[in-house]
Image (cartoon, coloured by chain):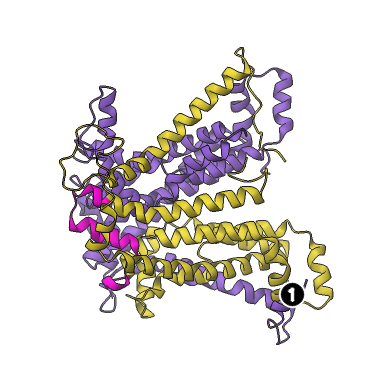
Chain colours: A purple, B yellow
Amino acid sequence: MASPTTRWLPRLRLSYRAQLALMLAPFLLGLLIFTVLPALAGLPLAFTDYNALEPPVFNGLANFSELLRDEVFHKSLGNSLIFIALATPLRLVGALGLALLLARRGRGIGAYRAAVYLPTVVPDFAWAIVWLWILNPIYGPFNQFLALFGLPGPAWMVQETSARIAIVIMLSWQIGEGLVVCLAALRDVPRELYEQVAIDGGSAWRTFWGVVLPAIAPVLLVFLFRDTIHSLQANFVASLIVGRGGGPNYATTFLPLYIYTNAFSYLRFGYAAAMTLTLYAITAAVLYLQYRVVVRWRLGFRDVD
Amino acid sequence: MSTDTLPRPPTERGPRLGLIMRHLVLIAVATLFLLPLVWMVTTSLRQAGQPLPRSIDWIPQPIAWGNYPKVFDLIDFARFAANSLLVALSAVPLTVVTASWAGFALSQISQRWRLRLTVLSFATLMVPLAAVWLPRFILIKEVGLIDHRAALVVPALMGTSPFYVMLFLWTFVRVPGEVYEAARLDGAGAFRIWAGIALPLARPTTVAVAVLTFVYYWSSFNEPLFYIQSTSKMTLPLGLHALLQLDRTNWPILMAGAVMVTAPVVVLFIVAQRALSQEYRGGGWFGR
């Protein structure tokens, strides 16, 4: 056990607990300095005028009253909410459907799972320029593919509605994480539950609604929360590159892009911080809404308390 | 252990026909997900400067391999690749050490504290990243790391993501306590038990975290965009950005660049997936 390579390690005698504390320190300190404090720092910053060059100047509620008047901000807020409303259910249902399809083992299942997961590992930027090409209205493969079936393709990034839908579509390919979560959840469903339904003579559909879905609902809810938060920032590169900076007519200017533009292009850090507060607010509101909807359906939660 | 989670629905068709149908559906789904990648590769092999075809050409005529070396002429691809490698390869060992330390320590402390710290970790996963961009930028600026590649590695000091710490924790709590007890009675400290016993037992998790970490830093676009200014310090995603700004319509060249940035990640993923599905036989995510 104590291999010779580790003999150099503890020369000074610390108690076991002190050593454990030392091991935890980088993670906990990092979490504090790099996530917790920055998450809290947005609050005071939002009440200042700050360009990151001179010290911040307190300006009261000026940022917030400007937010009320800023029409691009209103549009980006609406865009983000539309995006969440379209993308998160699609991603959740897609991941669950794929997991049901890919759960049963069999020949070549590893290859199928890998194929579905692969778009998720493609670097965001490469993915964005690939879709910039795919969505080209005339030469892009998407519309040419539709033309094979005689379907007219929209001028994707030219019209506002199709541009928003295009961003949702391109990010719906990257659902590998959800697939993995759903596969793991399905694997943990006790076999006795299936057998009970089999004895009762239930159909596959009834098994799914009556047994599988309630059993995995808590996992799905946690994943839905995580994916909602992820969705809020996942469209940043897409709107920057595929939307060519949030166009057309600000249709793909989502909150992260507008925060980025104000902070890093206009050096208005205080104003951008005020937007991040609204980001927290809508995150909390959407998560609460999702929680209420799931509770209303009374899916699962029999095991929780 | 079995991954066979769903009972076969009773069918009137023979089992053979059902099996064939199932594979057809699976092939269709796999194709759908691979299509963007296929189009990326086929477009990268088109002759640059030729008029674009009005229908899908699955195999370009002639195949223009020359687009790939051309990317090296247009941008300093080798330098960007070296920067990306430097950042990713610095971040991987740091992340594995700090994340597995934290995971091991969490597996050793009292149940109550483990629960509290786990909840805290998950709570931080719920913070929208776009909300911490600015304070993090100001922090990096205050410590003088703007335009230093080291700024890109900073998250590795805390294990990159609480998720990786949790992966290690889940692995370490499955190890029976007696395994460590014997070593402790011999007077081994926490660091020695971590290095000598715990980490070697967690090899599949270590591989998974190492691969995920590499992919994360290799692919990262936002952090380099915020922190890096000099061309000589740019990583590959910023290099692709530069390539895009040179000519927004030279699709074969752009796709060749995208393929070269994507390929290492895909290869690494496939290699790791095979390694992991062997290790976690039966219970693995991607295993049979």
Q: Quadrant of residue B152?
A: bottom left
Q: Label 1 sits on what residue type?
A: Ser
Find out whether residue B241 is within the magenta segment: yes
Give the position of the N terminus of chain B as an image quadrant.
top right
> Is residue B172 something one can see in this rendering?
yes
Residue that sits furthest to the bottom in the current view: A12
Q: Quadrant of residue B192?
A: bottom right
- Residues shaded magenta: B228-254
> Where's residue B147, x and y in %?
32, 75
Residue located 32% across and 72% down the image: B233
Q: Can you say whether B198 is above or below A86 in the image?
A: below
Residue of label 1: A3
Q: Nearer the viewer, residue A43 or B139?
A: B139
Give the position of the C terminus of chain B as an image quadrant.
top right
Residue located 26% across and 77% down the image: A53
Magenta: predominant secondary structure element?
helix
**Horizontal relation, residue B268 to residue A3: left or right:** left
> Where's residue A90, x and y in %?
42, 36
Residue located 34% across and 49% down the image: A127
